[in-house]
Amino acid sequence: MIEPGHHVFTVSSDAEGQRLDLWLAGQMPHQSRTAIRRHIQAGDVLIDRIPVTRPSHPVRAGRRVEVTLPPPASPLPVAEAIPLPIVHEDAHLIVIDKPPGLVVHPGKGNLTGTLVNALLHHAPDIHGVGGVRRPGIVHRLDKGTSGLLVVAKDDLTHRALTGAMRRREIHRHYHALAWGSDLPDTGTIHAPVARDPRNRLRMAVLDGGRSATTHWHVVGRGALAMHLRLELETGRTHQIRVHLAHRRHPVVGDETYGGLSPEWLSRLHRLDSHAAAAVRRAPRPMLHAAELDFVHPATGQAVRFRAPLPLDFLSLAEVLIR
């Protein structure tokens, strides 16, 4: 049996031209073809270190195929009495202003203390909505990102909201503090995103990744940093953080993608040692989901929600954007 973890195969000459999903099914007989297709589409399969997300991709003899299988699913989440900052709630959905540091759903290393655990306590009927492991969840925010999330309270609403998300009918605007000061006032980043083959905990801009589009508008500039307002067209994992790092403007405080690099901190220290010390104390990437607009599935009315910038963001903006 193929165990969870990282596995490497080499395509033999007699397999030349086979579909990737069919060929992998022969290498991993204990994985269903449906599961294999899901792994391919999720970016868990690399060919010669490049992600391939199309199950029908033809394999070529001699190519190196890497597959990363996730660990077994964690136990089902349980209800926990965790305070929830609720912006809006009705019979069909809840809008939450997620604080930084709160993980959205249980997973490896975070089996309890998540938003899902809190939701199960606050609204027990949400159990099983859209699935038992991530009940009610329509979209996610990274652990360190603060701001607005919409959660469905019934299956009909969940299907409607996830469909709207796929069709890009849910509009999300973020605010970020990013290093550098030379971006044009407005612009767009079109760059495909996939899992980084050198570090499976990161994402990266890679040929063959899933298409991703981020729009930006500069709200304010300092000598070494900018306050940006950003709009997502797509919702790839870590998308804003990866796109800004790709443009060499990582999010301030983002250790994973260069937002706490010695280079930026050293340059800031030469300008303002107090500001540099404040950035070093930044507990998270300075990224906030501030605006959420969509059509309410039950009423058909357009709804708009806003979450003010949190204090840690405002405090850092005050020392960086002058």
Image: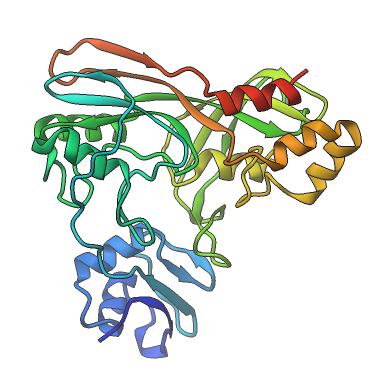
Residue 199: give x, y in percent of width and height: 55, 65
The residue under the point 24% across, 39% down is 81
Q: Is residue 202 visible?
A: yes
Q: Looking at the picture, does residue 79 appear above or below residue 54?
A: above
Q: Nearer the viewer, residue 4 or 91?
A: 91
Q: Looking at the picture, does residue 243 appear above or below residue 153?
A: below
The residue under the point 34% across, 58% down is 41
Q: Nearer the viewer, residue 66 or 116?
A: 116
Question: Is 232 placed left or right of 71 in the picture?
Answer: right
Q: Residue furthest right?
A: 270
Residue 157: give x, y in percent of width and height: 15, 29
Q: Is residue 216 visible?
A: no
Question: Is 308 placed left or right of 136 in the picture?
Answer: right
Residue 214: give x, y in percent of width and height: 53, 32
Q: Residue furthest front?
A: 81
Q: Quadrant of the N terminus?
A: bottom left
Residue 176: give x, y in percent of width and height: 59, 29
